[in-house]
Structures are given as structure tokens and as C-alpha cells.
Amino acid sequence: MKIANAAEKTDDQKKIPQWGMVIDLKKCIGCDTCTVSCKAENRTPPGVTYNVVLQNEIGAYPNVALVNLPRPCMQCDRPPCVQVCPVKATYKLDNGVVAIDYDRCIGCRYCVVACPYGARYVDFGESYSQEMLGANEIQSPEYGVDRGKREKGKSPINNVRKCIFCLHRLERGEEPACVETCIGDARFFGDLSNPDSVVSRLAASPRAFLLKEELNTGPRVIYLK
Amino acid sequence: MAEYSHNNRRSILWYAFLILLMVAGTVAVFIRAKEGIIVTNITSTTPWGTWVAFYIYFVGMSAGAFLLSTLIYVFGMEQYEKIGKDALLVAILSMVLAMVFILLDLGHMERFWHALWYMNWTSVLAYEVRFYVLYVALLLSELYFARRIDLIKTSVVNNRKGKIAKFLSFGSKDTSEASKRHDHKMLKVLGTMGIPIAILGVHGGTGALFAVVKARPFLNSALFPVIFVVSALVSGTALLIAFYVIRNKVSGNSIDQAMVKGLAGLLSFFLLIDVGLEFYEFFIGAYGLEHEELATLKTMIMSDFSWSFWAVQMVIGVVVPLYLIFSKRTKESVKALTAAAIMVAIGILGVRFNIVLPALIVPVMTGLPEGYYYPTLIEIISSGGVIALGFFSQRSCRKAIGG
């Protein structure tokens, strides 16, 4: 399993942390706190959920079990979404996060079709304004851009959106919201290019596996069985 | 103007109907532009819908019509000459419709120019957009050489039609035999250049756009681009037969029965290859027993949506037309063959919807929501308007440039 090719990088690039996440499925209780805190942090509209927890029943009655699988964006090292974007509106940042330029994106949704993890969402412009007072008054400063009020026809409405490991939090030295709020401490976050980091050591565990590894997308989210 | 003297009432009704569709379509497009893509039933699970299906339908129609025109201009099959002029115009207008459909589908329509301004060297779609531009330019120049002498002849008359013809002939006044030979040579050169552009670039490429998506095992097959090209030939041939017969019926001209029969034979040949390729596509997909592949096939042939496969794609699109083309009782009848052609053109629409949608109904990961998609009224009415615009401009262009 190849997670980050830090050894191939020059000294200059080494200084940029290569963000990665480890999710210990044994510790996940399926409480959906990550999903909720993500929605609160990123103020995502209805229908846009950067993080979801998939619940699947396995086995046959009476030997059944409920398996929880939290699914943020994998921030793939060879991302199919970036490969297909006709206008290069989505691309890898130096720190490994897959970003979207909302002002360049034409909204063709090819990336949504191409993502093997269903991690991309279309912002149709829906709003929680019926449930929440002033829901449209402010948006999350995604990518460090203050877009002011949420208004019809203005990006990110009619764009594609996705999890970016809470880039705006990383930049001020905080962990992504889902990592910070996980009540079972099932999520770990750190620099995969540093072999001594917690994430690097957990990723080397024999319990580690990747989603759809056969597609060779190189996910930066590593799961522990 | 012969078209008006015969079947006057019927054609007035037809154009009234088209205008009605276009007016309704304009309203729908206006609402869509104002409200955004929320007016569709597209979701994050099923991110493409009716407009994308129509887009690939018309790209296919265009490639098919163009390839048929090359039979005449490149391969010298003079017996099809009568549909040649129609073929080029249909190819151009189909491509225009395809572009209108994909424009409607963009979340940010105002940024359509980004698709040409910015380039991503690994994106099939980025190449496609450029191929479409190149292809339309090539078709327009071919049409010019195909019509040049006729335009010059018309431009002598001092009326509106003459003025249009004068403008469109771009100052060319040479009607000599030598210039005619030159036109033919240009048509041959352009047509030859167009064949790889149409097959590999425009339509094979559009198929590749779907086929490269490894996230959707059903689409991720090298056979897809080939099926795209073959079904393009099917729909292109079908539409041209229908246009040829209906146009001459309406204007009271005689119909070349032998040519219609020949074209219908060609149509059945393309159709049989298409069905054979689809069989292998489904068979090999199913044989792998891969979960998503099976779920997609199941969505297509045994679900709420399967009527589009069985009724539209198979019965209307394959079984009945093949019967009409091969049956002793109907194979001599121009009417029956035209009906077969129209049915095939409708059937290919089913093929296009079944390329886009079933793979997007099945979620990419177990546990993610299932997709469900039927178009909204806005999607249907706007599509109707765009198609009506196609029929309307086909007629207007033909009137303007003659033929």
C-alpha cells in the first residue's frame, strides 16, 4: 500500500505537510456527530453533505451486524474527478487536498459522475432558511474566501462542492471539524509525509485498508478494520 | 414554394405546432435560467438527466448524418446524392441542438466559454468541446462547397432569397465546369478529413467521455465508444430517410423508391451490428457478476424504468422496424419503410437515455442513496422547444439556401 510518496519529494516540497486522515472503524459507533459537525462548520445546504456515515447490514439473520463507514472525501492522490474536469476547476493542492475553484467551475457535473466514492455534491441552491433564522446571511469561508450572503445564481450555488478537510481550519492550526468532534476518537489527522506522525504510524498498521483500492486512486483517507 | 400549394393545411398545422413548442420552450428556458438547475430532477446521485441524453442523441445524429454524406462525397455512391444536401444540413443543425442541450445542462451557463478558454489535458470532455468546434467548422465549409454553384445561380435574382444567396456565396461568381470540379474535390478532401474527426473525435470521443469513468463499471467498457459510433450511423440514416420521404411527399415530388429501399437496407445492417454489440456489452458485463454492473443491468431491464429499454429501445427501436424492413408484405412500401425509420430514430433515443441514466441510478457505494429520475416538466418542455427549433431552422435554412 502506497500512501504518500514523501521519499520522492524534494526538500522544498517536504516542508509542505501532506494531509491525511485515519478512521478507526472499530471505534466508530455510527452517531453521525461527524456529519452534523461538518454541516455546522461548513454551513452546507440541504443535499450537500461533505461527510456521511454509511450504514450497511452484513450477514444473514440471525447472524447480522451493522457496519458503519464514515465517508469524507478521500483526497485521492490520483483523483478521477481532477482527471475529468474540462476546465481544471478542480485540482490537487500542494498539501494534497483536492480543491474546487467555484468561480471557474461551469457546473457540468462530470466530476460527480467520475468520483468512485460519491463524495461530490451539487449545490442546487436549497437552504435551511425555513428551519434556521438567517441561514442565508453568512457562508463558511471555504478556501479562505468570504462570499458574503448566499444568493441565488451566485457560486457556490449551481457548482459542485466537496469535503476539503476543513482547509480553513487547517490554515489556523486546527483539525477538521469531524476529527475534533468525533466522540469515540475514531478519527486521526496529520501529516502523512512525516513517518513519525500518528496517521503515518496508524496507516502502517496491518488493520489498515483503503476504499476501492483496486481503482488505484490513492486515497488519503485510510481506514482501520 | 411548391410546399405551400400541396398539403397546405397540414404544413400550416405542423408549423403552428412547432411555433407553439418553441414558445413554451422559451418560457421553460427562461425559468431554468432564472432559477438554476434546481428546476430539474437531477440530484447528486443522478447528476445527469434528460438534457445530457438529448445532447448525446444529437451528437450521434450529427455524426451519423455526416458519415452518410461521405458515402456520396467521398466514396462516390451517387445513388444517394438526393439526400446529400440534407445530410450536411442535418449534421450541422444536430450539432447545434446538441450544444444548446449541453448549455442548458450547465450549472453556470454564463461560463460556457470557460470550456474553450481553459484546458485540462487529461479531460476527455475538454478535447470533445474542441472537436465539436472543429467539426462544425468543417461541416460549414463542406456545405459551402456543396451549395456554392446553386447559391450563385440564386443570387442573380434580385429578391431577399437572392440577397441571402449573394451573401452566402462570399463573392464567388465562378460557375464554370472547372470550378465545379474544384468544389467536388474540396468536398472529397473535407469529407475525408471529416471521417476520422467524426468517428474518433466527435462521436467515439463522446462515447469515450462515458467509457473512461471507472467509477461506473457499466460505462467503463472499451466497447462503448464503438457502440456510440454505430448507433450514430443508425439514427443518422433513419432520420435522413424520414426527412427525404416526408419532404418530397409534402412538396408532391416523386420519391426514389429504390434509394429508400437501399437506405433501409443500410439501416437494418447498422441496426443489426448495433444490437450485436450491445448484446456483447451486456453479456460480458453480466458475466463478471460485479455488483454495480448487475445492479445497473437490473435497473435497465427489470425496474420502474425498464419500459424505456423494452418498449422504446427494443420493440419500437429494433423489432418492429426490422420486421417492416424484412417482411415481404412491407419491404416494397415507402410508407412502411419511412415508419420503420421514424421508429428507429425514436428507439435510439431510448438507447441514449439508457446509456446516461441506469449507471447513475445505482449508487457508487452501498449505503449511499439510490437514484431515481424522471424529468420535470421544465426539462420536457424545454427539450421539446429545442427540438422544434431544430425542425424549424432546418426548414428555414433550406429555404434560404435552396434545395
Image: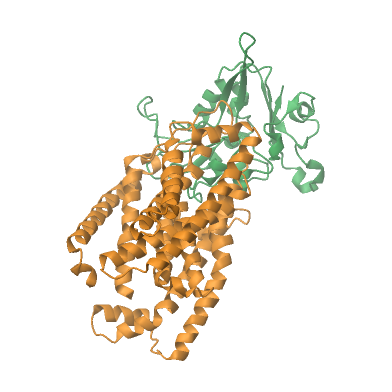
Q: How many marks?
A: 0
- Pick the residue in front: B283 or B148: B283
- Kindly tell me whether residue A7 is visible in this rendering: yes
- Pick the residue in front: B184 or B326: B326
Report the quarter where the N terminus of chain B lies. bottom left
Q: Which colour style is shown?
A: by chain
| Quarter residue A17 falls in | top right
In the image, residue B154 sits, relative to residue B210, either above or below, namely below
**Residue B246 at x, y = what percent?**
31, 62
Report the quarter where the C terminus of chain B lies. bottom left
Question: Residue lying furthest front in this view?
Answer: B328
Residue name at image x 49 percent, y 81 percent = B184
Question: Residue lying furthest top in this view?
Answer: A62
**Residue B257 at x, y = what percent?**
37, 66
**Residue B127 at x, y = what percent?**
57, 59
Residue name at image x 52 percent, y 56 percent = B270
| Quarter residue A168 falls in | top right
What tint does the image give chain B? orange
**Residue B121 at x, y = what percent?**
62, 57
Decide if residue B62 is on the left or right side of residue A10: left
- Pick the residue in front: A24 or B124: B124
- Identify by letter the chain in green: A
Decide if residue B162 is on the left or right side of residue B173: left
- Pick the residue in front: B200 or A83: B200
- Kindly tell me whether residue B45 is visible in this rendering: no
Decide if residue A75 is on the left or right side of residue A87: right
| Quarter residue A111 falls in | top right
